[in-house]
Image: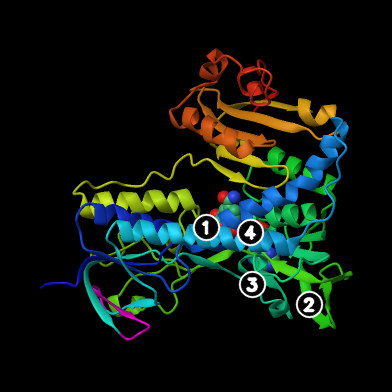
């Protein structure tokens, strides 16, 4: 049978675009359908605009520091309209870059929603039916709201970048990456931020000492974090949203942001037409090669709900290309993935938390919490954390956790050593770069505890 294409990709985000380009570069006939803007969550409504907002939100604090260093400086007011116009322009530019990269690789673009129609065909929203030898689903995920009465009054992370005005008072619900990052951003931009988290401590699953330090830093910056608290009802009265909390207290805010997790985009995809197996959250079930239960259909990225991070989706896309179109079966290595939470203070992490490592084997913990030179000079009390979790038996560094300005940049590099299997003694043999914060990672002599 002849097909219209060798590969049809559904979804123009990080994973889909990368796979399409790499497969097309191997000489295959490739098409890609995207129903929204090219670039997907990361570029259009995630990592990229979020990080630009982090930058924007840091200037008030920097102006404070600058004054301490002798500069006559006042950050003045933040102009959201100006920033939004700049942001829109930048996202347009990036979307254009993604589009041109695909076109330059001879990938045919369909700006339409596509759904499966059996194992070797898709149907576009236009009604056009297209056949392909292989299909790759890379449709990503979407933010989820809880079923709190009145939850429709709130917004989700997708909406933040398009707000006409910044709220003066906002409630953020959730304690994960997105909730904590936006708490810092909106606080830095001048909003009064309250954060409700249902658990005992924000950033569940991360190293306890590190998450406690992040929470402290957020609180010190003025964020009102209320743990063990849920929003149980919301009503709008005029421009104000009245929120009732689970402890019976009430709160008046101008906006509520739900950052209560994300779910895979599998509805309306026609998966049932090909018999593709999904899991409890609707995620597409795949093996180590991103293969679904149907041989001609694979899936990468958040739609598979493995590790929902952009670089992981890209790697999965590349491994897919190599496996299915390169004749070289390449499993994806999801072990020891470094990542950063762009909270303020920033948090970088790789490997096991102290708690997870302790449950696995006997460990030593090396940690230094100290006031860094730059902000200490400016009279700030804030401390940074450099922490290594080490196996007593193999001496390998099992986890590294950094809470500090630029922690994301640091953990990328520490991640290489740890991925290579570095031991504590390898860290010790490495000469310090002085004066830096990260030098503490190679100068910690005695463990603070053994467990
Ligand atoms: P997370 O899963 O990280 O966090 C969801 C939060 O919402 C948790 O604190 C959870 O509580 C809480 N929650 C879930 N359901 C409810 C509910 N019904 N009522 C109240 N609270 C609820 O999701 P995010 O939305 O923050 O982020 C999604 C994913 O996106 C992340 O897991 C990450 O993979 C990715 N991401 C990565 C970033 C980065 O790398 N810097 C940045 C942003 C996102 P509990 O802990 O009790 O379950």
Q: Nearer the viewer, residue 370 or 209?
A: 370
Q: Residue furthest left?
A: 1
Residue of label 2: 233
Crowd band around label 2 with a 10 angstrom C-alpha radius: few (<14), some (14–19), many (20+): some
Crowd band around label 3 with a 10 angstrom C-alpha radius: few (<14), some (14–19), many (20+): some
Crowd band around label 1 with a 10 angstrom C-alpha radius: few (<14), some (14–19), many (20+): some
| Residue 190 % position (x, y) | 82, 56
Residue 200, compared with residue 99, is above or below; it is above
SS for callout 4: helix
Residue of label 3: 145
For ligand 1, give the image quadrant.
Answer: bottom right
Magenta stretch contains residue 123: yes
- Foreground label between 2 and 1: 1
Distance in Å between CA atoms under marks 2 and 3: 13 Å
Distance in Å between CA atoms under marks 4 and 1: 18 Å
| Residue 447 % position (x, y) | 67, 21
Distance in Å between CA atoms under marks 1 and 3: 20 Å
Residue 59 shows in this picture: yes
Distance in Å between CA atoms under marks 2 and 1: 31 Å
Disc number placed over residue 42 in the picture, else none = 1
Precedes in sequence: disc 4 or disc 2: 4
Precedes in sequence: disc 4 or disc 3: 4
Viewed as shown, does residue 29 lie left or right of 15?
left
């Amino acid at each position: 049978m002849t097909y219209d294409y060798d590969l049809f990709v559904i979804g123009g985000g990080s994973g889909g675009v990368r796979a399409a380009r790499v497969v097309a570069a191997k000489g295959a006939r490739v098409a890609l359908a995207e129903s929204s803007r090219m670039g997907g969550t990361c570029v259009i409504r995630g990592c990229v605009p979020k990080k630009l907002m982090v930058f924007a939100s840091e200037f008030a604090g920097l102006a404070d520091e600058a004054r301490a260093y002798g500069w006559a400086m006042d950050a003045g007011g933040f102009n959201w309209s100006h920033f939004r116009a700049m942001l829109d322009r930048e996202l347009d530019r990036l979307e254009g870059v993604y589009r041109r990269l695909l076109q330059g690789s001879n990938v045919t673009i369909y700006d339409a929603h596509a759904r499966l129609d059996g194992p070797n065909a898709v149907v576009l929203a236009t009604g056009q039916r297209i056949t392909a030898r292989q299909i790759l689903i890379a449709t990503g995920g979407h933010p989820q709201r809880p079923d709190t009465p009145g939850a429709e009054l709130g917004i989700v992370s997708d909406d933040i970048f398009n707000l006409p005005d910044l709220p003066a008072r906002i409630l953020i619900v959730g304690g994960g990456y997105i909730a904590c990052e936006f708490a810092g951003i909106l606080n830095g931009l001048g909003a009064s931020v309250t954060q409700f988290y249902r658990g005992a401590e924000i950033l569940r699953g991360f190293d306890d000492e590190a998450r406690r330090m992040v929470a402290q830093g957020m609180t010190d910056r003025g964020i009102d974090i209320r743990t063990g608290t849920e929003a149980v009802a919301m009503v709008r009265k005029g421009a104000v949203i009245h929120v009732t909390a689970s402890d019976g207290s009430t709160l008046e805010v101008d906006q509520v942001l739900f950052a209560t997790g994300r779910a895979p985009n599998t509805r309306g995809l026609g998966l049932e037409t090909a018999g593709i197996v999904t899991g409890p959250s609707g995620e597409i079930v795949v093996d180590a090669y991103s293969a679904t239960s149907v041989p001609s259909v694979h899936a990468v990225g958040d739609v598979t709900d493995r590790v929902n991070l952009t670089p992981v989706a890209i790697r999965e896309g590349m491994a897919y290309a190599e496996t299915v179109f390169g004749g070289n079966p390449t499993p994806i290595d999801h072990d020891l993935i470094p990542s950063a939470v762009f909270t303020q203070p920033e948090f970088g992490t790789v490997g096991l938390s102290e708690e997870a490592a302790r449950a696995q084997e006997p460990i030593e913990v090396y940690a230094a919490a100290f006031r860094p030179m730059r902000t200490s000079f400016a009279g700030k009390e804030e401390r940074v954390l450099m922490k290594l979790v080490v196996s007593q038996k193999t001496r390998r560094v099992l986890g590294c956790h950094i809470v500090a300005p630029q922690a994301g940049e640091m953990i990328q590099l520490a991640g290489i050593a740890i991925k290579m299997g570095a031991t504590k003694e390898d860290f010790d043999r490495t000469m310090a770069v002085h004066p830096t914060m990260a030098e503490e990672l190679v100068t910690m002599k005695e463990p603070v505890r053994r467990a």
